[in-house]
């Protein structure tokens, strides 16, 4: 095997795509800042027991492990930043007020989340701690949509569900955690035959409702149908009301519901949402954003604070948007004349990109669109547009 061959689903990012990803990163962080989010930078690796505490346990199989040569303890490369941000909120900031945090950095997966996806996503996320009301859920949805718009994503669609719907149906059924997990998996896969077998020991009402759940997907009318056909309870009513409240405040976007969608069930505690791009015809449908409410995330750190947020992979996002044009630049000759060097420094200080041509490489500007040039005119260095000829 050649020494330069990288591991499967690990890739170098070349200049054009890297430039686009970096521009998106800046746009998204700026968007989050305008909503009042503070940037944090958790470490790439931690002691394994800390990294996998609480909800992080679900990430165990996705986490690369290694031994710390200094302490001999096992370390883990983070597979998700949210547990780390929860630790920061609980232990390092320890605020009683609402805290808005955002982050952007690489995570590493032992296996890719989807076929052909990278095992080294560049994860951007934004999270609100300390507010249990639906106002925080709505802000998270609005910020996620604003980030996609800032990135130039077209044909955005939003899908929502609430994990408390299944919780309400399983209440009082006396199921073991293993049995519940099997039902969750069957619902997520919409496996009717498996679901039929797994619900035989449940009450007739709960079993029938769970078998019905995979059929409850579509537009907002699904909430009315669910209200009529699913058993009523305080938890069920609350979940459906919350979905209805959020749906009534998401204008100008295609909206759908899938009440059997249980991806990340062990992680979320309430509303869960996902944003998609593409129409499936001219553009492939891509899930770009996943988020929701996860109020249990800080409990293991001694602070069970309400929490809601979302994350996305910038490497996935860049594939869903139109490539951006090259950055405009000024082409300058290389030279040691004081006037030339001063002119180049002055232009760069003003924010201009100035590409100095090294001798023999006059046409190698690569990732820049040089539409102007620096010329000496009557002893003065002047920026002039390139002749259209």
Image (cartoon, helix red, strand yellow):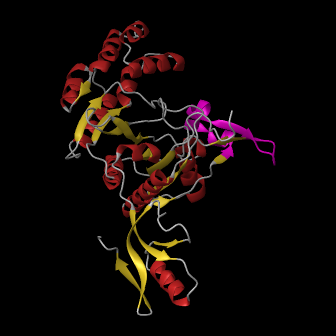
Q: Is residue 19 left or right of residue 6?
A: left
Residue 36 visible here? no
- In the rendered image, the vertical position of residue 389 relative to residue 127, given as above or below: below
Quadrant housing the C terminus: bottom left
Please tell me which residue is depicted at 47% across the width and 29% down the height of the picture.
115
Q: Quadrant of residue 330?
A: bottom left
* Between 324 and 35, the one nearer to me in the picture: 324
Please tell me which residue is depicted at 37% across the width and 24% down the height of the picture.
166
- In percent of width and height, residue 341 lies at 54, 84
- In the rendered image, the vertical position of residue 171 relative to residue 157, given as above or below: above
- In percent of width and height, residue 147 lies at 35, 53
Magenta residues, as a range?
Answer: 46-74
Quadrant housing the N terminus: top right
- In percent of width and height, residue 301 lies at 59, 45
- In percent of width and height, residue 343 lies at 48, 85
* Between 53 and 372, the one nearer to me in the picture: 372
- In the rendered image, the vertical position of residue 19 relative to residue 354, given as above or below: above
* Between 265 and 78, the one nearer to me in the picture: 78
Q: Quadrant of residue 277?
A: top left
């Amino acid at each position: 095997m050649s020494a330069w061959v990288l591991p499967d689903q690990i890739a170098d990012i070349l200049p054009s795509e890297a430039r686009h990803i970096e521009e998106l990163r800046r746009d998204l962080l700026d968007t989050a800042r305008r909503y009042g989010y503070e940037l944090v930078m958790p470490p790439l690796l931690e002691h394994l027991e800390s990294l996998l505490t609480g909800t992080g346990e679900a990430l165990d199989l996705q986490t690369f492990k290694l031994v710390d040569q200094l302490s001999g303890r096992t370390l883990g490369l983070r597979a998700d930043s949210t547990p780390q941000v929860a630790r920061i909120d609980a232990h390092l900031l320890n605020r009683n007020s609402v805290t808005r945090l955002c982050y952007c950095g690489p995570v590493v997966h032992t296996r890719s989340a989807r076929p052909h996806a990278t095992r080294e996503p560049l994860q951007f996320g934004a999270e609100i701690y300390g507010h249990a009301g639906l106002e925080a859920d709505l802000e998270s949805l609005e910020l996620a949509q604003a980030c996609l718009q800032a990135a130039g994503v077209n044909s955005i669609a939003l899908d929502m569900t609430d994990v408390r719907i299944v919780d309400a149906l399983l209440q009082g059924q006396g199921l073991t955690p293993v049995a519940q997990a099997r039902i969750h998996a069957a619902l997520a896969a919409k496996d009717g035959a498996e679901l039929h077998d797994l619900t035989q020991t449940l009450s007739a009402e709960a079993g029938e409702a769970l078998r019905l759940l995979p059929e409850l997907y579509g537009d907002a009318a699904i909430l009315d149908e669910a209200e009529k056909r699913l058993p009523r309870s305080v938890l069920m009513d609350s979940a459906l009301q919350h979905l209805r409240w959020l749906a009534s405040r998401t204008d100008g976007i295609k909206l759908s519901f899938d009440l059997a969608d249980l991806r990340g069930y062990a992680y979320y505690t309430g509303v869960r949402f996902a944003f998609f791009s593409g129409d499936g015809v001219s553009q492939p449908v891509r899930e770009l954003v996943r988020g929701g409410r996860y109020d249990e995330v800080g409990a293991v750190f001694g602070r069970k604070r309400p929490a809601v947020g979302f994350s996305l992979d910038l490497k996935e996002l860049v594939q869903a948007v139109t490539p951006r044009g090259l950055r405009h630049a000024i082409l300058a000759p290389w030279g040691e004349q004081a006037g030339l060097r001063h002119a180049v420094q002055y232009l760069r200080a003003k924010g201009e990109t100035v590409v100095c041509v090294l001798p023999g490489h006059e046409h190698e500007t690569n990732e820049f669109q040089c539409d102007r040039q620096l010329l000496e005119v009557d002893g003065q260095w002047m920026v002039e547009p390139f002749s259209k000829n």
